Amino acid sequence: MSQNHFKVAIIGSGPAGLTAAIYTARANLSPVVFEGMQPGGQLTITTEVENFPGFEHGIQGPELMDTMRKQAQRFGAECMFKDIVEVDFSKKPFVMKTESEVYTADAVIVSTGASAKWLGIESEQKFKGYGVSACATCDAFFYRGLKVFVVGGGDTAMEEANYLTNFASEVTIIHRRDEFRASKIMAERSKKNPKIKFMLNTTIKEVLGKEFPDGRKLVTGALLQNTKDGSVTEVAVDGIFMGIGHQPNTLIFKNILDMDETGYLNVKPGTTNTNIEGVFAAGDVADKTYRQAITAAGSGCMAALDAQRWLQENELA
């Protein structure tokens, strides 16, 4: 077999992918992990992780993922900072392509996770990275003493808003409905925070800002539309954070692996098996319900064990 062939290939490097790497490496399967565009997954843009068992006083997200990576490598996993852009699961061994190379594997674990959703308006794209963000923990520091909006009504929005109050002078949650879908504890925490205000039945119609000759851009405000009467108001603001949920990263598996209408991969109940034998799915890419680091890690363990058994049954281990 060529140097580009592996017993197990893991696509994605969040808690699911790296846990799968730890388990398959300890089973002497010498896995490769394709880390993708966001090595370490969503936890690398999370600061304090307080609910991952074993860390009494919490741990920084990037530190947790770095520790997981080193643990996997210690047992023989190979981590590549490469992005898989195309797959062919119609033949065995399975084929995976980067921009410039081709890799094959006997078994594949898909753990590509999910990415932040955006509003989809033109002005949002124009000011993305210049006052429009989907990651409070990445960019909150730049809004010290400034006014910001957080768009959304779920746990993501509440979490972003509460974190931003450590820096911003005022945080306003913009939500298109008059009630939140966030968990009660998260919503109550936001309501009790004196720095957080609410604008309900409201959407952002347009992001307003300045463009400078040297290419710099600056958000200065937004046009807000009332969802009840359609009225539009211009409001000054220094930054806008999107907290409207996530989209599974499954585009390259479309028409190859079974998925629901949103794009989450379907697995057979009680397993991590996809519709293709030898291909398994773990983590947020197949979980639209829990989406926690610990559940992702747990399903990564399951995928590794499922892959190991499948390889043994097919005399490939």
Image: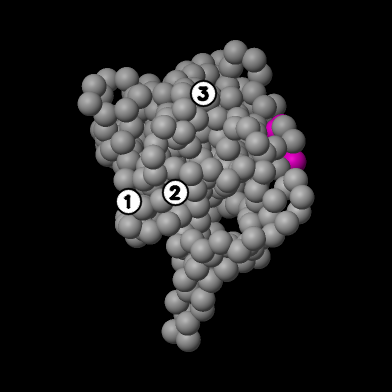
Image quarter of residue 50: top left
User: Residue 31 has which mark?
Assistant: none
Say if 224 sits above or below 198 in the image.
Answer: below
Which of the 4 image quadrants contains residue 160? top left
Residue 139 magenta-highlighted: no
* Mark 2 residue type: Val
Residue occupied by mark 2: 171
Residue occupied by mark 1: 167
Residue 277 in percent (x, y) is at: 65, 25
**Picture coordinates of residue 255 (x, y %)?**
74, 41
Q: Secondary structure at mark 3?
A: helix
For the stretch drawn in magenta, what is the main secondary structure? Answer: loop
Q: In the rendering, at what x and y percent does residue 138 appear? A: 38, 52
Q: Secondary structure at mark 2?
A: strand
Answer with left or right where residue 167 lies relative to residue 185.
Answer: left
Q: Is residue 258 magenta?
A: yes
The residue to which callout 3 is attached is 184
**Residue found farthest to the left:** 57
Q: Which residue is found at the position 49% from the left and 19% from the top?
A: 302
Q: Earlier in the sequence, mark 3 or mark 2?
A: 2
Q: Amino acid at mark 1?
A: Phe
Q: Earlier in the sequence, mark 3 or mark 1?
A: 1
In depth, the one of 185 and 290 nearer the eye is 185
Q: Which residues are magenta?
A: 255-259
22 vs 201, nearest the viewer: 201
Q: Nearer the viewer, residue 313 or 131?
A: 131
| Residue 228 seen by the camera | yes
Which residue corresponds to the image point at 57% horizontal and 68% vertical from the top-left?
208
- In three-dimensional space, the C-alpha distance between marks 3 and 2, rounded to whole angstroms, equals 19 Å
Against 304, residue 231 (above or below) is below
Q: Residue at x 32, y 51 (%)?
A: 167
